Image (cartoon, rainbow, N blue to C red):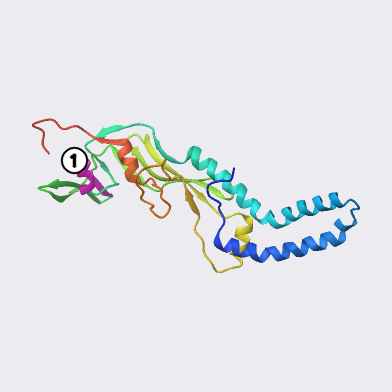
Amino acid sequence: MLPEHFYFTGTGWLGYIVYIPIGLALLTGLYLLLLRRITSIALRFISLVVLSVILLTWPLWGALALSYEAESLCNEQGGLHVYKTVEADGFLGGWGIETAAKHGFSYVESGGGKHMNRWTMVDGEPVRESITEFKSHYQVGVGGSEERINLRIRRARSASVKNRLTGEMIGELIIFKIYPSWFDIFILSLSPVEYNPWICGKEAPKQERYNDKLNKKYRYTFSDLIKATLKPKPRYKGEEE
């Protein structure tokens, strides 16, 4: 079964088109030097077919192996990882106060060092308060550490929610960065074209709505991680808004 995504750049395909006549020339040379000396017509034909497949497809082997490995890693390790769901009045980082308030949170905090802020909604308007200390127990972070799996694949944390007091990880969004295979890299090195690594791991299971309409997929964002890990504390009658 072929992988869902084949990691090969457009520049790599152009290089492969250029390679095909070279492969055919090599095949012709090998036939004249070796294969035509095989007396059995059947064996000569089988040898020619096998050698043709090998010579004409070997630039794609690295990309195919890369695609299988990336698909396995992304399916097994990528995506949302929720280790705990907690209640909080607010948090540090992540959303703006308008979004946070719509989801039931009382405040969000931002900044750091000498520039700390706490945001609340007052009469439907965002209000900023300069503070000297954060009161949030939980912090939303975007980006993070990367781990090299091999020469072509890196595991990265795209977003995280952690307890800022204890360092405990509450949840994280794991992605994989996929870099081109050896033939692709060789062709790219000969051209002025720049490339960015492919990203996998953000794809959610099949859903009715998309945020990537071109590919008809829903890709996780840090907002999905916040909603999966942080829940607003329930407010009871008589409590301040």
- Seen from the viewer's position, the closer of residues 15 and 105 is 15
Task: Report x, y in % for residue 191.
Answer: 58, 68
Please indicate whether residue 125 sits to the left or right of residue 12 in the image: left
Please state, as top left, top right, bottom left or bottom right, where the N terminus lies in the image: top right
Task: Report x, y in % for residue 238.
Answer: 8, 32
Please indicate whether residue 160 sits to the left or right of residue 151 in the image: left
What residue is drawn where x is 55% and y is 48%?
A: 153
Residue at the far bottom in the pictured view: 192
Kindly identify the amino acid type of the residue bearing the numbered disc 1. Ser
Q: Is residue 103 magenta?
A: yes
- Seen from the viewer's position, the closer of residues 138 and 196 is 196
Residue 159, picture quadrant:
top left
Is residue 105 shown above or below 60? above
What residue would you read off at disc 1? 106
What's the magenta region? 97-112
Task: Report x, y in % for residue 96.
Answer: 24, 49
Q: Is residue 25 magenta?
A: no
Residue at the far left in the pictured view: 238
Q: How many labels does the image show?
A: 1
- Seen from the viewer's position, the closer of residues 43 and 68 is 43
- Seen from the viewer's position, the closer of residues 95 and 108 is 95
Is residue 167 shown above or below 214? above
Please state, as top left, top right, bottom left or bottom right, where the C terminus lies in the image: top left
Q: Which structural element holds mark 1? A: loop
What residue is drawn where x is 15% and y is 50%?
A: 127
Task: Report x, y in % for residue 192.
Answer: 55, 69
Q: How many residues crowd mark 1 within 10 Å: few (<14), some (14–19), many (20+)?
A: many
